[in-house]
Image (tube, grey):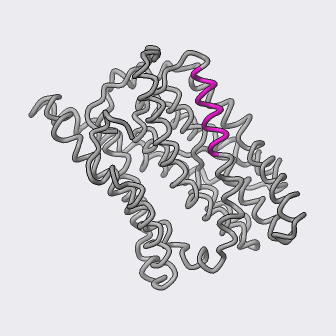
Amino acid sequence: MGKDTGLGWIEKLLALWVILCIISGLLLGKYFPEFSESLAIGIPIGLFLMIYPAMTKIELDELKKALQSKKQVGIIVFFNYAVNPFLLYALGFIFFGKILPYFGLITDETAKYLWTGLILLGVAPCIAMVLVWTDLAKGNGPLGIVLMAWNSIIQIITTPLYIALLVGTYIAIDIILIGESVLLYLGLPLLFGVITRREVIKRKSESWLNKRLIPYFNAMQLLALLFTMVVMFSLKGGVIIDNPNLIWQMAIPVILFFFLLFNLVYYTTRRLGYNSEDASTMGFHCTGRNFELAIAIALTAFASMPMVAVSTVVGPLIEIPVMLTLVWLALRRRNRFQNIGIEVKSTQKVGRGGVC
């Protein structure tokens, strides 16, 4: 991931660990379903342990500056709410409405369910894992927090409207569910991160924090990511193994969506004058999907269509390896631009220490 990342054995073999975690999770879900269900509590714990290390790198002064990022907020609002839902709808129309049924690769009924699940994945941006992708890609942490906060508020209003428009079903969004997610995946990690940073600098020094503590936090972050992957894959491992065709059927439009959108946002923001840190941050905040909300909606509003819920579960299982690939791509671009000396000055430069 670049010469300046100080990669340890965990990072160097990350691709191998990801593959092993996927296989382990699927096998657990298939052959030990009851044990897998008991691991469900591991998801919020794992997400917290992934996000908390990123928050220890945030300086409050930089966060205050990021709150003034009106143009950046405008960019993610445009892509998340004027482009994303319609892009996934269009990809669903192409693959589930035309190509796959035309060649007899899928029945019309199954295509309808998968198309619905794809739309559910597209209507709401991520408000949890996106902070992890931003941090792993050495993006602009304070800006990421501001963008996540705006997405948390806006999607409460827009999600029911887009589902009604694109699927034809009106649903009520559980504001409490969104609030709990924001508190657990933004509020608490930020609070603990700020306290940790302040106390460590007070008792030791900022240099000690950056050189001694942050590297351990980076390792904890990646271990938490791998653990969370095992848990997520195990929860629906049996369904996925029993329906292998569902993976490639959902994978085609989902992978296309992620790569098309991330690169569109990245290069658009670069052309607008933002550096690779800001461009990557905006790219991830426009690309990541709120799969927790999509699954919750599928299980409640579309309870009579179980295949819709299954399709929304497959979505994040595809998303995690793809987003890790985009992290690798963002780091390569960042290193390339720095090496050739054409990087522009960030408007909200983040104080960073250590890896990621």
Percent across and percent down for residue 9 are 27, 53
Image quadrant for the C terminus? top left
Residue drawn at 41 percent across, 67 percent down: 20
Please, is residue 146 above or below residue 29 in the view?
above
Please, is residue 41 above or below residue 63 in the view?
below
The prevailing secondary structure element of the residues shown in magenta is helix
Residue drawn at 57 percent across, 58 percent down: 316
**Residue 214 covered by magenta stretch:** no
Residue drawn at 37 percent across, 50 percent down: 50
Residue drawn at 58 percent across, 50 percent down: 290
Percent across and percent down for residue 346 are 44, 17
Q: Nearer the viewer, residue 131 or 318?
A: 318
Count numbered badges in the picture.
Answer: 0
Percent across and percent down for residue 195 are 24, 37
Image quadrant for the N terminus? top left
- Residue 11 appears left or right of 196: right
**Residue 260 covered by magenta stretch:** yes
| Residue found farthest to the front | 340
Percent across and percent down for residue 261 are 65, 38
Where on the picture, by quarter, is residue 213?
Answer: top left
Where on the picture, by quarter, is residue 167?
Answer: bottom right
- Residue 60 appears left or right of 241: left
- Give, as a single range, the part of the protein colored magenta: 258-270
